[in-house]
Amino acid sequence: QVQLVESGGGLVQAGGSLRLSCAYSGQAFSSYAMGWFRQAPGKEREFVAAISRRGVTYYTDSVKGRFTISRDHAKKTVYLQMSAMKPEDTAVYYCAADFLDVGRLPRQDWSQYDYWGQGTQVTVSS
């Protein structure tokens, strides 16, 4: 059984930085692509970033150049480094795992992901 636990959320001023962590427990961490999604009040869940099993990364346009996703296979942890943050980044951020063939690029469709964390709140004040 896979479990994902996010941490690192909080309140930050516009222009500031936060680093989210997602701790993975269970077998076969390396068999999963990992993604970050977010959901703001009254809005649909949206893709933020993902990283393949081999470390290929993909970002939504609104966070390119500001956010960086990474993974540490030894620690079974995925990170989302967020910089130059904006009030529109305010949302609950979710980590997710996608069981994916090793050669495939990470996916943006949240419905394709197999496991989810409970979410962590990120609030950016103006």
Image (cartoon, helix red, strand yellow):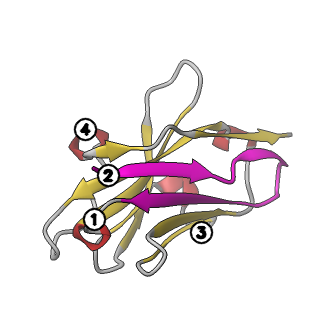
How far across and down, in percent of the image, does residue 108 sit? 31, 50
For image coordinates 40% across by 59% down, the residue present is 25
Rendered view: 26 above or below 3: below
For image coordinates 63% across by 52% down, the residue present is 7
**Residue annotated with mark 3:** 65
Tell which tag, 2 or 3, sits nearer the viewer.
Answer: 2
Q: Are marks 2 and 3 in contact (CB under 8 Å)?
A: no
Mark 4 and mark 1: Cα distance apart in space? 22 Å
Q: Is residue 14 magenta?
A: yes
**Residue annotated with mark 4:** 111
Residue 111 shown left or right of residue 83 in the figure: left
Look at label 1 and name its amino acid.
Answer: Gln
**Residue annotated with mark 2:** 2
At mark 1, the secondary structure is loop
Q: Which residues are magenta?
A: 1-25
Mark 2 and mark 1: Cα distance apart in space? 7 Å
Q: Are marks 1 and 3 in contact (CB under 8 Å)?
A: no
Q: Is residue 52 magenta?
A: no
Look at label 4 and name its amino acid.
Answer: Ser
Residue 18 shown left or right of residue 37 in the figure: right
Look at label 2 and name its amino acid.
Answer: Val
Mark 3 and mark 4: Cα distance apart in space? 26 Å
At mark 3, the secondary structure is loop
**Residue annotated with mark 1:** 27
